[in-house]
Amino acid sequence: MFGVTENAGGTNVEMQGVVHQKSKPPASRRPAARPAFDWQGGALARLVREKLRSFDLRPTRQRVSLASLLFVAGDRHVTVDQLFDEAKALRMPLSRATVYNTLHQFVAAGLVREIALYGSKVWYDTKTGSHCHFYDEARADLFDMPEDVAKQLAIVPPKGKRIVGVDVIVRLVDDASENATETGDDPRQ
């Protein structure tokens, strides 16, 4: 049995009855999800196995562990590195290559959606339906827009074609004029 608990001093990881204490990582590096690491028949593992089977994926240990991380916290946007760091923090025995390959299997099955951003940055979105995103460049953070503006675009496809999806990603930076106005320095003057 493997379990994870958090307290003020850090994270306790229990493996086969032995508790190992791990100090808390900085807030910016803390994993978003902390599911119990149980493949033996826990409720989360059973739900994840059922979900994987419904997408015609065999529920291997690696797939169950990564799907647990992905889906326990609701809709999420993660990169391979973020998911690998979460798995590592929970001491899941997975390599970065396994995370990468498993995410690609999830994309091929339709379980997650791949979003490529400017260069080599690729995000994986657990919300697979059509929706729009904001990308905060300063924080390297991808998140859903509260409203799907794609419906308002009224795009007409070329003759003989139909639209199957519209991907809108709005890139954001901090507003220098807003920050300057707060301090009394207005860059427009």
Image (cartoon, rainbow, N blue to C red):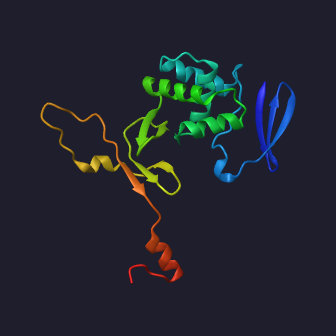
Q: Which residue is depicted at the point 82% across and 31% down?
A: 14
Residue 53, relative to residue 136: is it above or below?
above
Q: Residue 144's x, y, as percent?
A: 45, 48
Percent across and percent down for residue 171 are 40, 54
For the C terminus, which image quadrant? bottom left
Residue occupying the point 60% across, 31% down: 96
Is 23 displayed left or right of 77 in the figure?
Answer: right
**Rendered location of residue 54, percent (x, y):** 49, 19
Which quarter of the image is occupied by the N terminus? top right
Viewer-closest of 61 and 50: 61
State which quadrant residue 17 falls in: top right
Q: Determine the residue positioned at 50% across, 83% down.
A: 184
In the displayed structure image, the side of residue 33 where residue 106 appears, left or right:
left
Outermost residue on the left side: it is 159
User: Taking 112 as reference, is 156 left or right?
Assistant: left
* Residue in the image at 49% along x and 23% along y: 105
Measured as percent of width and height from the top left, residue 69 is found at 61, 34
Q: Please, is residue 127 above or below residue 8 in the view?
A: above
Residue 21 in which image quadrant: top right
Which is more toward the observer, 137 or 142?
A: 137
For the view shown, which residue lies furthest in the front direction? 119
Residue 138 vertical position relative to residue 99 in the rendered view, above or below: below
Q: How many marks?
A: 0
